[in-house]
Amino acid sequence: MKRIFISALGVALIPLAGMGQCPAERDTLPKIDNSKYILTPPAPATPRINGAKVFGARPGSKFLYRVPCTGERPMKFSASGLPKGLSIDPEKGLITGVVKKPGEYPVEITASNSKGTTTRLLTIKIGDEVALTPPLGWSSWNCWGLLIDEGLVRETAASMVDNDLINYGWSYVNIDDGWQGLRGGKHNAIQPNPEKFTDMKKLADELHSEGMRLGIYSAPWVGTYAGFIGSYSDNPEGRYEWTVRDSLPSLQEAWPARYYNWRNGKHSFVANDVKQWEDWGIDYLKYDWTPNQLYYVKEMIDALRSTDRDILFGMSNAAHWGDAPQWARYPNCYRTTGDIRDTWGNMSRIGFQQQDKWAPFNVPGHWADADMMVIGVVGWDGELHHSRLTPDEQYTHVSLWTILASPMFLGCDMQQLDDFTLSLLRNNEIIEVHQDELGYQGFPFFKDNRSVVYAKPLVDGSMAVGLFNYGDTPLDMVISPSDFGIRGQQKIRDLWRQKDVWEKEAKEKFTANVAPHGVVMIKIYPGNNRGEEPDGKVY
């Protein structure tokens, strides 16, 4: 079955010569109806501002923030208390400009449509730290691999807008390995393969116009994992006319040459490449190699900070535990694992066994990254399949990454999102836990050979709790709020169903029946879950 895509960003997806698989026409998979597993209620027609309540930028950097607000369109936005240099687009809710003076600025944002009005406080922090909450977005590798091109980037961005994901805070669209051509241009920097990417600046500008951000990929090696030019070279001009993919016809033949170039070369072109990314308007860098030496991390961070952009630095992969205090200071995200796969064994091992030790070093601005999400239609190099995780396992996957405060980058075909997958991504109460400004990584409060209870303190004094059953049969799990040092009358809210399910004294027992490989995700709190102040404004 074939289908044709038209970009919601207003750009026709035209086939380019030599691209291989055209982004505007491809095979689609038969749909799987998982609608009976949907728990998230639909968003109301009234305005609702979602996501993080804090946003960071550096003094003098180009500022871009889209108010993530669901509700019927058209909608009008306004903001009071914006720092000098910023303004808001009343139609799109885009806040842009440049702030020169460091400080914390409480900004009251108002969104209105024909159904109603809502107001929410956003704290803008202008200072040294960015990525004050874990990034949300999409990365190309787990779906398209080396097939990635500008058409696929545009259709992904269009899907994030059309499916309202942008209005829950999903904003990064990151290009992984395979975009590179040869070194050149005014900066003698890595240029894109012209058969895949004709104008990177135009692409970035299109995404920025919707409040989205564009990411790029490189390595401090002579060649990347996939055999393309890295940010180092043995040639002082960096002008070697090769890539392994061009010179060798098969992966088997390419393997020895690729492996040989997985090394740091004699000459750095980091400054060259960063200047090019600044010109294009890049917002995120995945820097991918192992072992992760601190010298190359600091070199890249210094270069990124010399620009007029807040380019987040994602360090990959398999970060060394012994250097954890350094990762909590330098990269904005640091991969703690190798590549994830869409199996229960792999996902649960990463989530339940490999992340807990990173908790003391997982802090705002510097996030321990458990790798990409494996929900939806995934695959590599276009060999797509439905995630092999069951619906219950997908709830566990999203809930666990949420409570661990891991960055969440989708890796699926965004044109084949079904209602169930969208329900996993559009739950504002789950996202609010993930984006909580305290930034605490949840910790295992109780664990045995069948289950684990994770607890994550939140900025409003409430506690998010995940009851996970990694056994193969249903399990009744029992807790009391007093187990967590909580006293007095309390409520328990089911976050996926978005409803209160219990209200008693903290010492009383709460029982949840948890499916095999499943989760019940709750919040323990003493008052109104929406945080309504006496003046009626929602903060």
Image (cartoon, rainbow, N blue to C red):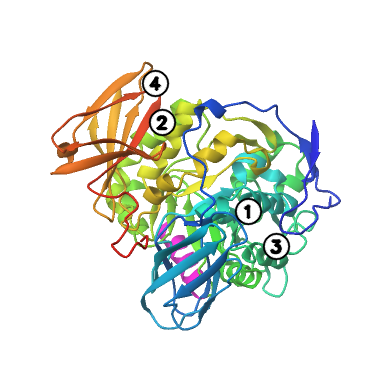
Amino acid marked by disc 4? Pro
Cβ–Cβ under 8 Å for marks 4 and 1:
no
Look at 71% across and 75% down and name the residue there.
186
Q: Nearer the viewer, mark 2 or mark 4?
A: 4
Q: Tell me the chief SS of the magenta region.
A: helix
Query: Where is mark 4, residue-wise?
Result: 516
Above or below, comparing residue 233 to residue 371 in the picture: below
Tell me the quarter of the image containing the N terminus.
top right
Dot 2 or dot 1, earlier in sequence? 1
Above or below, comparing residue 90 to residue 417 in the picture: below
Tell me the quarter of the image containing the C terminus.
bottom left
Give the CA distance from mark 2 to mark 3: 36 Å
Instruction: Sort mark 3 into few (<14), some (14-19) or many (20+) by Cα contacts within 10 Å.
Output: many
Dot 4 or dot 1, earlier in sequence? 1
Q: Is residue 221 visible?
A: no
Instruction: Sort mark 4 into few (<14), some (14-19) or many (20+) by Cα contacts within 10 Å.
Output: some
Query: Where is mark 3, residue-wise?
Result: 203
Amino acid marked by disc 3? Leu
Q: Which residues are magenta?
A: 293-306
Dot 3 or dot 1, earlier in sequence? 1
Drawn side of residue 187 relative to residue 96, left or right: right
Query: Where is mark 2, residue-wise?
Result: 348
The image quadrant that residue 378 belongs to is top right
Q: Nearer the viewer, mark 4 or mark 3?
A: 4
Look at 60% across and 54% down and name the residue there.
173
Dot 4 or dot 3, earlier in sequence? 3
What element does badge 1 sit on?
Answer: helix
